Image (spheres, rainbow, N blue to C red):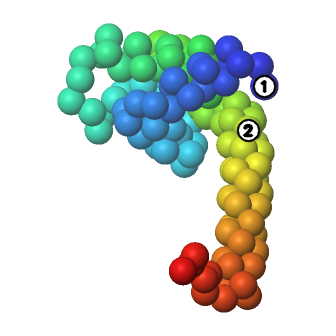
Amino acid sequence: MNELKLDLVFGALSDATRRGMLAQLAHGEANITALAAPYDMSQPAISKHLRVLEKAGLVERTRRGREHYIRALPGPADEAGGWIAYYAKFWKQQFAAVDDYLKANNQLNANEGPKKGND
């Protein structure tokens, strides 16, 4: 996933309203009225949130008559999850290496015994 696309996905996911909409869409497609129902905001604000999700590739809009239906697209979220998983693994390895170093250093210090001062 290129950096621009990753920025769009993380930007879209940074808002609680958009995350809530995606959670609703996890149960299946919905029309805009149903998506807007839980939120106390204007229709233009709802539309703006949906455009952000569409631009990030997280949702797709289809029109049936006068109704617009929205469905979630898992691909970009999966790719962002893969990016997170890669770096989580990397940092876990780094922390494990530091932990091993500290344990070895503590063991070495314990084996040397107390240091004698210059008397």
- Choose the circle earlier in sequence order: 2 or 1: 1
Q: Quadrant of residue 39?
A: top left
Asked whether, in this view, residue 2 is left or right of residue 8, the answer is right
Asked whether, in this view, residue 114 is left or right of residue 16, the answer is right
Asked whether, in this view, residue 82 is left or right of residue 47, the answer is right
Please give the name of the residue rendered at 71% of the width and 19% of the height, measured from the top-left corner: 3
Please give the name of the residue rendered at 46% of the width and 31% of the height, measured from the top-left corner: 14
Q: Which residue is mark 1?
A: 1
Q: Are marks 2 and 1 in contact (CB under 8 Å)?
A: yes
> Closer to the camera, 6 or 98?
98
How packed mark 1 is, by other alpha carbons closer than 10 Å (few <14, some 14-19, many 20 or more), is few
> Closer to the camera, 118 or 47?
118
Q: Helix or strand or loop: what does disc 1 sit on?
A: loop
Q: Position of residue 5 (x, y in %)?
A: 69, 19
Q: Would residue 81 be seen by someone viewing this image from the given angle?
A: no
Q: Which mark is residue 64?
A: none
Q: Would residue 44 be seen by someone viewing this image from the given angle?
A: yes
Report the label total. Answer: 2
Amino acid carrying label 2: it is Trp
Q: Quadrant of residue 26?
A: top right
Q: Helix or strand or loop: what does disc 2 sit on?
A: helix
Amino acid carrying label 1: it is Met
Q: Mark 2 and mark 1: span between their CA atoms?
A: 8 Å
In the image, residue 10 sits, relative to residue 94, either above or below, namely above
Q: Residue furthest front?
A: 119
How packed mark 2 is, by other alpha carbons closer than 10 Å (few <14, some 14-19, many 20 or more), is few
Q: Position of residue 35 (x, y in %)?
A: 40, 32
Q: Position of residue 79 (x, y in %)?
A: 75, 35
Q: Which mark is residue 83?
A: 2
